[in-house]
Image (spheres, rainbow, N blue to C red):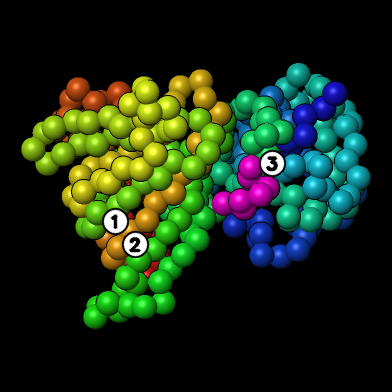
Amino acid sequence: MHSNAIFILCAENEIDLDLPYFSPSSLQSDGFIHACCAEQVKAVYQQFFSLQSQVFVAVIDTRLVSAEIKYESPSEPIGNDKPFPHIFGKLNTNAIVDILEYQHFSHQDISDRLLDVLAHYRFSRLPVEGTLYKSTWRATTELANEKPVGTAMIGMYCHTLKSVSCFHRLSHDEIWHFYAGDAFNLYLLFPDGEVESIVMGTDFAKGQHLQYRIPAGVWQAGEVLKNSEYAIFGCTMAPGFTGDCFEAADHDLLKEQFSGMSDVIERLAVNDGDTAMPEGFAS
């Protein structure tokens, strides 16, 4: 029995989720759209995409695909020669539940439960960090500097489709909320050198928090607990979040200052040296 998750490797911005369908040139030339299973992604990347600088993986829920999908042997040897999923028709983009950078793909299968969550919330990927997120409220009332009085978002951490927060700090306090799924860690590095790890979740007997305030100027990062599937959380800010209130860390410098957290800092350094949000983001 085949998994309900299949994948398409693509260049940056090749797939436009604002359009109703994705119709690459292979649909005309070969009669179908090439896709692959989780265990085949690496072989496809190595054979066809390894020389490209930016490669992305589109995650497709086959239960949502309107065109016919057939599993067929490739025309030339690729990987273990198992049949590949071929999509015989234009791909309705509402069947694409995530697009992430290739280097953050775990090459593991995706559970139906995780596909359900992705299809329901329709997350985007946050610039710089790549975190799965969705803006849910942005106040129309503005402060004197024309910035919103408050904002709210929903986010999701998971390992299979790597979604974490790299170390960053904000110019305003931020309130974190646990909503659903598995517990997750928040790592806090304070200006005075203090380090704190907070577990967000529902088990108060174990000291887990449903809500937690992170003060302005504190380096913060987060990830779902090891061997967990996903965690859904929320963040609210007042004044609201704008791109210029965000600063991602230089992780090499941060490891010098907090050497005891080097492993965590390195593991969550997903920002590739970028420290600022794109100009105009969340402005």
The one nearer the camera, 200 or 105, is: 200
How many residues crowd around disc 1 within 10 Å: few (fewer than 14), some, or many (20 or more)? Answer: some
Vertical order, 77 against 189 (above or below):
above
Q: CA separation, marks 3 and 2?
A: 28 Å
Q: Which residues are magenta?
A: 117-123
User: Residue at the location (79% across, 56% down)?
Assistant: 92
Rendered location of residue 259, percent (x, y): 18, 25
Mark closest to the chain's N terminus, 1 or 2? 2
Element under label 2? loop
Residues at discs 1 and 2 in contact (Cβ within 8 Å): yes
Q: Which residue is mark 3?
A: 116
Which residue shows up at 32% across the image and 70% down it? 149
In the rendered structure, the answer to whether residue 244 lies left or right of residue 54 reads left
Q: Nearer the viewer, residue 232 or 251?
A: 232
Q: What numbered label is drawn on residue 246?
A: 1
Query: Going 68% across and 39% down the picture, which residue do you hit?
Result: 115
Taking the image as shown, residue 244 lies to the left or right of residue 127, namely left
User: Which residue is denoted by mark 2 in the rendering?
Assistant: 241
The residue positioned 76% from the left and 19% from the top of the image is: 80
**Amino acid found under the numbered disc labelled 3:** Asp
Q: Quadrant of the N terminus?
A: top right
Q: CA distance from mark 1 to mark 2?
A: 8 Å
